[in-house]
Image (cartoon, rainbow, N blue to C red):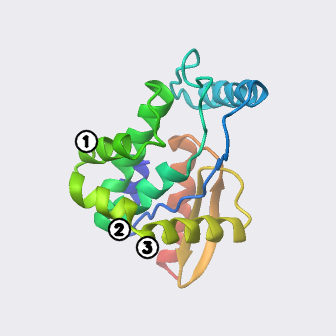
C-alpha cells in the first residue's frame, strides 16, 4: 500500500484507510474455524506471497477478533495519518508471521511505537470512547456500502465514490486502475 499511496500522493491525492472489521469473534475459535481460516491464509499466500506462520498462527485459545487492530489503526489515523500504513504493516506482520496476539493493547502499543507514534498518546487515544465509536462508524460505513472483500480501494471525487478494486490486486494490476481514475478525474 505504501507504493500505491506514493503514486496517489504524486498526483495530489491522499489515501485514507477505513477499517472494515473483517472478523469480530466473540469466543475462542474452534477446530473447524481454524481449519477454514488456515485454508484462507494458504489461498492469500498463494495469491500474494504474504508470509504466514501456518504452524503456530492459530493457537487453540485464539479469539480471532480484528476490532482491537482496527481500533489501533483508527487511533493512529487520528494522531498522525502518515503513520497508519506503517502501523498496518506492523500489525499484519506481528500477527500473521510472528504469531503475536494483536488483540492485546500492550502489543498494539508496542507496534504503534515501532511505527513512530508516541506510546502514551497512542495508548490514551486507543482507550478513548471516541476512538471506539469512530471504529464502529467505520465498520458501519463499510457495511452500508456492501463491501465484503478486503482490501477494497474506493476513489472519491466531488463526493462521488468509485470502486477501483474489491479484494486484493497486485500493484502492477492496481496501479494502472488508479492511474486511469486519476486521469479521468483530473479533467472533470
**Front in this rendered view, residue 134 or 157:** 134
| Picture coordinates of residue 50, whole percent (x, y) | 52, 29
**Mark 3 / mark 2, whichever is N-terminal:** 2
Q: What residue is pinned by disc 3?
A: 130
Which quadrant of the figure has residue 72? bottom left
Real-space Cα separation, disc 1 to disc 2, in angstroms:
17 Å
Q: What residue is pinned by disc 1?
A: 114
Label at residue 9: none
**Front in this rendered view, residue 27 or 20:** 27
Q: Which residue is drawn at 74% across and 65% down?
A: 146
Mark 3, secondary structure of its residue: helix
Q: Which residue is drawn at 42% across and 56% down?
A: 73
| Picture coordinates of residue 167, whole percent (x, y) | 65, 48
Residue 83 seen in render: yes
Q: Which of marks 3 and 2 is in front?
A: 3
**Mark 1 / mark 2, whichever is N-terminal:** 2
**Mark 1 / mark 3, whichever is N-terminal:** 1
Q: What residue is pinned by disc 2?
A: 78
Amino acid at each position: 500500500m505504501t507504493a500505491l499511496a506514493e503514486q496517489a500522493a504524486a498526483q495530489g491525492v491522499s489515501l485514507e484507510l477505513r477499517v472494515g472489521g473483517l472478523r469480530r469473534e466473540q469466543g475462542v475459535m474452534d477446530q473447524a474455524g481454524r481449519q477454514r481460516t488456515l485454508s484462507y491464509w494458504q489461498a492469500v499466500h498463494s495469491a500474494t506471497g504474504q508470509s504466514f506462520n501456518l504452524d503456530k498462527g492459530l493457537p487453540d485459545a485464539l479469539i480471532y477478533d480484528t476490532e482491537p487492530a482496527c481500533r489501533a489503526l483508527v487511533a493512529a489515523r487520528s494522531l498522525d495519518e502518515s503513520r497508519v500504513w506503517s502501523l498496518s504493516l506492523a500489525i499484519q506482520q506481528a500477527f500473521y508471521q510472528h504469531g503475536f496476539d494483536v488483540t492485546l493493547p500492550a502489543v498494539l502499543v508496542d507496534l504503534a511505537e515501532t511505527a513512530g507514534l508516541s506510546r502514551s498518546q497512542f495508548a490514551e487515544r486507543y482507550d478513548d470512547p471516541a476512538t471506539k465509536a469512530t471504529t464502529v462508524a467505520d465498520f458501519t460505513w463499510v457495511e452500508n456500502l456492501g463491501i465484503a472483500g478486503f482490501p477494497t480501494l474506493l476513489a472519491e471525487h466531488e463526493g462521488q465514490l468509485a470502486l477501483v478494486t474489491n479484494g486484493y490486486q497486485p500493484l502492477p494490476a492496481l496501479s494502472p486502475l488508479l492511474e486511469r481514475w486519476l486521469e479521468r478525474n483530473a479533467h472533470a
